[in-house]
Amino acid sequence: MSKIITFISKNNYYGKSTTILNLCTWLSLLGKKTLIIDFDLNGNISKYFENTYTYDIKDILIEEKIIDNAIYDTYIKDLFILPCINRDSEDDSLIFDIISENLFALKNLIDNSEKKFDYIFIDTSNKDIFYKNALIASDISCFLIKAEDSDLNDILELSEILSEVKENYNRWL
């Protein structure tokens, strides 16, 4: 059974994607079968691998395709990616509608995968609805913040979202 870990932050440029890439590469090199789910509409991690993707997470959610059709090998042994391709804002609003209507959308995708991984890391967009979907699907959450006074509010907001998800949707988080 996979250990599912989500990284979230209230702002961009806090190092979520870089941290995930480093951790996943390290785990893969240790022989752990690892999947990165790029659930960030900017698709930063997907761009890193410079792969040509036929399907991505948007296709899977919008067209209800099987998740395994959009999981790709990377050039690192035992490291796989479910990409997010930055296409157009119409797709982004469709994704937003889908995950707003079904908070379990990402969890259902992961549960329906036939491929088995030791670890699954989720990189999220910095919007509450993405956090909720990712946290519902996760075993562990990691908040990335800067050590500044202005970020204390971010900690409180993220803690409230975590508490809501834990209380109402995922008590194992």
Image (cartoon, rainbow, N blue to C red):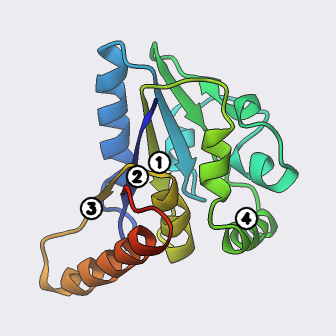
User: Badge 2 is on which residue?
Assistant: 6
Asked which secondary structure carries label 4, the reply is: helix
Q: CA distance from mark 2 to mark 1?
A: 5 Å
Residue at the farthest right position: 63
- Crowd around label 4: few <14 · some 14–19 · many ≥20 (10 Å): some
- Crowd around label 1: few <14 · some 14–19 · many ≥20 (10 Å): many
| Marks 2 and 3 in Cβ contact (< 8 Å) | no
Q: Which of the two discs, 4 and 1, labels the residue nearer the N terminus?
A: 4
| Marks 3 and 1 in Cβ contact (< 8 Å) | no
User: Badge 4 is on which residue?
Assistant: 95
| Marks 4 and 2 in Cβ contact (< 8 Å) | no
Q: Quadrant of the C terminus?
A: bottom left
Asked which secondary structure carries label 1, the reply is: strand
Q: Identify the residue at horizontal 76%, vertical 30% (top origin).
A: 69
Q: CA distance from mark 4 to mark 2?
A: 18 Å
Q: Identify which amino acid the numbered label 4 is placed on.
A: Ile
Note whether residue 83 is visible: no
**111 shown above or below 140:** above
**129 shown above or below 87:** below
Q: Closest to the observer: 82 or 64? A: 64
Q: Identify which amino acid the numbered label 2 is placed on.
A: Thr
* Viewer-nearest of discs 4 and 2: 2
User: Badge 1 is on which residue?
Assistant: 122
Q: Identify the residue at horizontal 37%, vertical 37% (top origin).
A: 21
| Marks 3 and 4 in Cβ contact (< 8 Å) | no
